[in-house]
Amino acid sequence: MNAPLRRVGIVVMVLFGLLFANLNWIQAYKADEYRTSDYNGRVQVADYKRKRGNIEAGGTAVATSKETTGKLKFQRSYPGGAKYAHVLGYKPVNLADTGIEQVENDFLAGTSDQLIGDRFKDMFTGDETGGGNVLLTLSKRAQDVAYDQMRNNQVDAKRGAAIAIDPRTGAVQALVSMPSFDPNPLVSHNTTEAAAEINKLEQNPDGPLKNRALAETLPPGSTFKIVVAAAALENGVTKTTPIPAGSSYTPPTSGTPIRNAVPSICPEPQVTLLEAVTESCNTGFAQLGVRLGADKVKEKARQFGFEQEDLTVGQLGEGGLRTAASRTGDMLNPDGSPDPAALAQSSIGQNNVRMTPLQGAMIAGSIANGGSQMRPYLVRQLLAPDRTTSYYTAKPRELRQPVSGQTASDLRDMMVSVVQKGTGQKAAISGYTVGGKTGTAQSAPDRPDHGWFIGFALDKNGNPVSAVCVVLEQAGSGGSAEAARIGGQIMRAAIADPGGR
Amino acid sequence: MTVAATPAPSPATTGGESGVRLARSRRNAELSLLLLAMVLVAAYMATVEANLLDTVTPDFWMPAAALGAVFLGLHLVIRFLAPFADPALLPAVALLNGLGVGFLRRIDLGEAAPVDREDLATFAGIGGRQLAWTLASVILAAGLLAIMRDHRSVSRYAYTLGLAGIVLVMLPAVLPRSISEINGAKLWIRVGGFSLQPGEFAKLALLVFFAYYLVRKREVLSLASRRFLGIDFPRGRDLGPVVVVWLISLLVLVFEKDLGTSLLYFGMFVVTLYIATERVSWLLIGLLLFFGGAYLAYVLGSTVGGPFANFYLRAEIWLDPFADPTDKGYQLVQGLLALGTGGLFGAGPGGGQPDILPEVQNDFIFAGIGEEIGLFGLSALLVVYLLIVERGLRAALAVRDSFGKLLAGGLAFTLGLQVFVIVGGISKLIPLTGQTTPFLSAGGSSLMANWLLIAVLLRVSDGARRPVTGGSGKASRPAGGPPEQLHGAPTEVIKP
């Protein structure tokens, strides 16, 4: 019986050898994959041992971490609740993080290469120095106003977005997406509750998690006329050049006539470009677009930033919140030939033209800034945990030059005229020169229209101080006027409290 | 009840020379190894406190000291009652048991509110309960050593134990679900707040029966055969008992929904059969039957469902745990992630997060420990287990009677197989089945049964290493001992 016993001994060794080999596979070969797995809460618990840095706007912490007695040592909290949700995002225990919390995670968590000195110091002191602080460009007051005004808009729009940027720098002064959500329950250490909460938000048909200011594209309606006007100004048309208008225009090859919002707008056969912009003359711009041709309109839109897919809003270097690309559509027939009907519709911001609120604010901003479009950004400064050293300070930089200084000046005059005499009068701010353009865009055949406003404010010396874009989705009649009013309010707040830039 | 467990010493196996060579009892070696093990356990507990509490409390050594005291007691019992027992067994088991208590206490510390942590009583929580169970189990093991002065004496109760074993195995299956089912496996008897896993004890009882039965039948099983394809196959009628055990283990699989226990019983039986008959054909038949049965259960589970559904589900989870990582595969996935996070060196005792793992105190204790002591620590633990198993097999090799060989060999192999089944299960080597990790997992039944198993191994190893001639006055020799010994072991010398 000894021979089989010895063999059994060998079998046991083989079995244990298999265990050993398998443990090597898991703990050595696959270790990194498992350690960084999305389902692994352990590394996150380790993250929570260190105090995560603040995110601040205008000297106030809008995301901060407090010590708890629980297993996870620090609880993230967002004192502003839903107000800053789409900028900050959230840093949950188990779920995916978003917003600035995500893009600046390494610095906030203290694991960034930039903070290696602090980590090195910790090795000797045994302390856990917290993560670094992120200072945002947001103006606290503008954000307050934007959030309150959007939520309490007078046309009962349920969805929409508002964004304000400093035209001279590109610093984002306010960013609101409506409806918003309270990120605090999502960062609960009770991961089941957090998961249930995010589930609820994801199920919500209004999509509160979506950042509409940066990532929602909608037909821009008449706000797009500014792009067409810019193309016209650079192709021999001046502010005072008469252009064909009329109460109705039927593009060649299409039976659907284009009319104006109300019959009292530009019924005369010809109006000046200035008047066409001021009154928002559909028939005029449809014909202007057809005259210019699709290529010129599309090219001008591209020069304003349409079709850019990789723009991010965060630091001015790499990374940041992702944006959606605005589109003009191809304005072609299915067989590839030019489609004047599509072009006519596109020239008044319908058909397949789609724009993000950010793009709207960038158009207004570049016109206010003499034709120079600054790259938008949200992160003003990265401060060391002890707040003495700065690891990054935003240096504003030009993104592109959509129009010449002269064209910008002409467009500025026309947009100022809109606010002084035309459709955007509710945006006016006393003591400042405000320009803008409203838009009413058909959303779907049986749905109320979207109301748009893009605009800017200039101080007494003609320096631009704020550019804004407000959209109220499916706001119906009066939507664009309400958007203009909210835009004016936001810019006024941004003037009073310029935020950091 | 005569005849049966013949010593059947073959000249090659009788340890004439080994008896002389092993004349030293080596009890002092055992004592120093035991002290070393307890120092390791105390150091482990100190590290846990340093990591969890940021300080080491003045009485961190209390659980280690309590364990040390009772192990020392067992050492003394061995010194007097089994002086030639294997000196490595007790320290190795004591180390595992101590680390188990330490890790369970670490779970208690992790779950206690930070203010209460420093004052956690020695016998508080699952760690404290495990400590109490250890004390009881070790006392019981000592008692078994005291009662069973010669391992052959248990062969007298072989049929009783065999019947008891079958009853213990089947009991949870026939009891109502409310009493017997925990986490989908019907393996328990729960009365009040007290739960017992009778299968753990059944293992021992059945093995005694197998050993006894096979020693009696080994000749007919190994000689009467038909040759087919160059392998000797047993006659059909001799297959009877094997088929019965196979059926019982399949019934366990189906009604108790537990592949691990089923595999354990069947493996145990096939291996004792193989040791007894020295026929490879038994191994082949056994493996074929088991894998065939398991595959059948898998196929039935996917098509018919019903009682096979649980096994099918487990197999599916095993094949791809990440297919449903948050629900069905959660436990296995988290076990793998714990092991992976531990990596080579681990997070340090007290540095991991075992509370994420469901059932970390039971089935997944190896993964929980693995997160903290890493691949190196786990390898060391595996080596300690391997040491125990190989020492048990060593005792089987050296002991002079067939019953002892089968008993020790079977027990040692079963222990090794159990470690393989559970560690392989949590590390996705084989489908996960609910087994305890011997000496580590929380649970009185498992701990107690395994300590009894160790007591038997100690006893057999004592018989194996005891000098054939001379020795202490109490020595009972396989044959021709003092009359009272002969009287005590009536089945020894008569052979028809």
Image (tube, coloured by chain):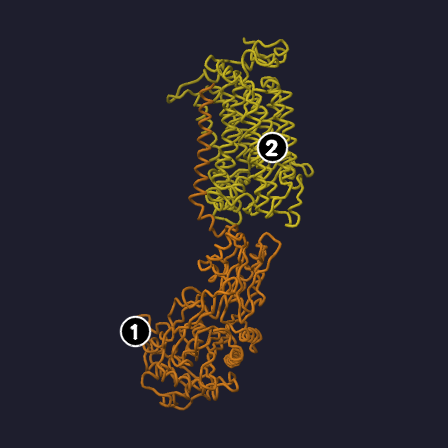
Residue B289 as seen in the image, left or right of residue B455? left
Query: In the drawing, what numbered circle is on residue A337?
Result: 1
| Colour that chain B carries in the picture | yellow
The chain shown in orange is which?
A: A
Helix, strand or loop under label 2: helix
Q: Is residue A10 above or below residue A363?
A: above
Pinpoint residue A418: horizontal percent, then vertical percent.
46, 86
Query: In the drawing, what numbered circle is on residue B226?
Result: none
Pinpoint residue A149: horizontal percent, then vertical percent.
56, 76
Residue A140 location, quadrant: bottom right
Residue B326 as seen in the image, left or right of residue B445? left
Residue labelled with disc 2: B447
Is residue A220 in sight in this rendering?
yes
The residue nearer to you, when weighing B279 against B248, is B279
Amino acid on which disc 1 is placed = Ser
Amino acid on which disc 2 is placed = Leu
